Image (spheres, helix red, strand yellow):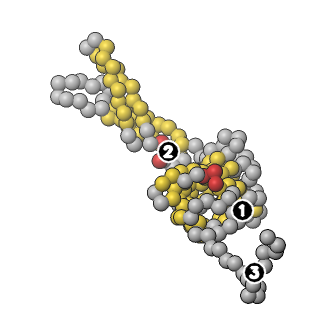
Amino acid sequence: MPVHVQPVAQGDRYRALFTLSGFDQLAPGRYTGVITFRAGPDIDVQPATLPIQFAIPQPEIRLSMPNSVDLGEIRQPREPHTFEVSAEFTEGTASEIEARLINLTTGGQAADANDFTVLVGQPKQVGEDRRRYMIPVQLTAVARPPAGVYQGQIVFSSPSGLAVEPRQIQVVFTIPQPELLVMLEGDVLDFGDA
């Protein structure tokens, strides 16, 4: 866990402000540790150790999902592509999840995430457990975006501020080149009177 120290001189003494980071990388639970201070041979550091303890709370909504999902080809606007996430609630209800598409790119260039919508569907309870649900997530193109392979993240949140973990999933999908198909009946095209 990274520790940043910012010493402040006060005459012949120093005070220090310690900043710990990396809490977002820790699993929920209680943690204890010791910060050990070391200095050169001519410097006396008192106290030489400082005990610390802290807790990372359980999120109110825990999602189980793969790191990434390939949604395949999106051929038509408004054609939903769906995947499911498993959700366990320690607080709140199954309607407590929203999702949005961010950091969308195609061909290494930024793409407009507003060309797509992400909807969280109706949750389905898993067995008799009123805290576990399967939740469908749909990605849909609003209009026909440019062809290409798209990559981005779908980020989950709670409108009432409950903690959701993990918060995002990587998505990949393809918009193929449009195909134009003209069907003719007979040998003659009649455009009517000109």
Three-letter code, disc 2: Asp
* Direction from residue 33 to residue 168 in the image, left or right: right
Observer-nearest residue: 110 or 25? 110
The residue at the point 33 percent across, 20 percent down is: 8
Would you place residue 74 above or below residue 98 in this image?
below
* Element type where label 1 sits in the image: loop
Tell me residue 120's x, y (percent): 71, 56
The residue under label 2 is 24
Residue 122 shows up from this direction: yes
Determine which residue is flagged by label 3: 189
Picture mark count = 3
Check the image and report above or below for 163 versus 87. Answer: above
Q: Quadrant of the C terminus?
A: bottom right
**Residue at the image point whose x is 50% and y is 44% from the top:** 24
Q: Does label 2 or label 3 sit earlier along the sequence? A: 2
Q: CA distance from mark 2 to mark 3?
A: 66 Å
